[in-house]
């Protein structure tokens, strides 16, 4: 069991440190709205992870193995990423007021993180891959609970640390000084990831 949990932990760390849409969104929202925005966005992403894990454990794997479901997810996810990116390309003068207003409503940031995660077909593909390797027909409830706690715990720890680093005075002051260019770069990254998602092919489909 320990070897399996270490394997799950290693895979989770690798997927977390790989640059992607979730990382870009948390970075953008933290710069715009501070640690509260970053924290709520991360919470939304973690909620999405739990949803992926739940239906994968329940055996609803067709979401990742169905060509139709994969296509719908990638088109919707790509459109959402491009939408977020285009928002970031708006004039900088409109950002502070919107960021201040949105920061007062954590639900806005949480929903962004949740949708960003749920609409990414890489989520179910990752969790189905993990479960296919580490979960067996005779796996106990305790084992499954430990597996879920391991992957969600590592993910949560990563986001807490990441948002904390972005809030370090020296880091945040530089990001704010270059906020116009950083926001523009992150917006382009989100748009690029959306287009890349549109062009993605499902493995094995």
Image (spheres, rainbow, N blue to C red):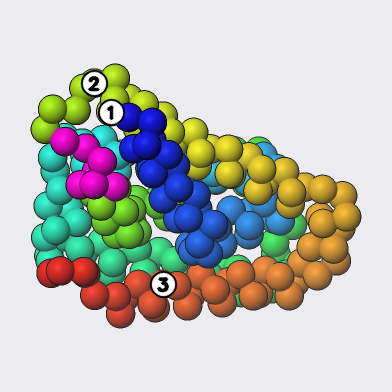
* Label 1: how many Cα within 10 Å (few below 14, some 14–19, many 20+): some
Which residue is under mark 3? 194
Identify the image quadrant of residue 23.
bottom right
Magenta-drawn stretch contains 135? yes
- The rendered magenta stretch, by its main secondary structure, is classed as helix
- Please state the horizontal and vertical placement of residue 127, each as a whole percent of the image: 29, 48
Q: Nearer the viewer, mark 3 or mark 2?
A: 2
Q: How many marks?
A: 3
Q: Earlier in the sequence, mark 3 or mark 1?
A: 1
- Please state the horizontal and vertical placement of residue 72, each as a whole percent of the image: 21, 64
- Please state the horizontal and vertical placement of residue 130, each as a whole percent of the image: 29, 47
Magenta-drawn stretch contains 179? no
The residue at the point 14 percent across, 58 percent down is 65
Q: CA distance from mark 1 to mark 2?
A: 5 Å
Q: Secondary structure at mark 2?
A: helix
Q: CA distance from mark 3 to mark 2?
A: 37 Å
Q: Secondary structure at mark 1?
A: helix
Check contact, mark 1 vs mark 2: CB within 8 A.
yes
* Label 2: how many Cα within 10 Å (few below 14, some 14–19, many 20+): few
């Amino acid at each position: 069991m320990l070897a399996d949990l270490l394997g799950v932990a290693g895979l989770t760390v690798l997927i977390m440190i790989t640059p992607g849409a979730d990382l870009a969104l948390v970075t953008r929202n933290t710069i715009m709205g501070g640690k509260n925005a970053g924290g709520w966005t991360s919470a939304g992403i973690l909620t999405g992870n739990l949803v992926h894990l739940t239906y994968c454990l329940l055996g609803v794997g067709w979401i990742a193995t169905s060509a139709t479901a994969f296509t719908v997810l990638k088109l919707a996810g790509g459109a959402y990423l491009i939408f977020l990116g285009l928002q970031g390309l708006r004039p900088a003068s409109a950002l502070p007021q919107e960021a201040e207003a949105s920061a007062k409503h954590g639900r806005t940031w949480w929903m962004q993180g949740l949708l960003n995660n749920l609409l990414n077909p890489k989520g179910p593909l990752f969790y189905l891959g993990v479960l296919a390797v580490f979960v067996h027909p005779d796996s106990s409830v305790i084992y499954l609970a430990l597996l879920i706690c391991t992957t969600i715990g590592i993910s949560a720890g990563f986001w807490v640390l990441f948002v904390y680093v972005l809030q370090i005075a020296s880091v945040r002051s530089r990001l704010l000084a270059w906020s116009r260019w950083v926001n523009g770069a992150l917006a382009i990254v989100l748009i690029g990831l959306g287009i890349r998602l549109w062009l993605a092919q499902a493995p094995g489909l």
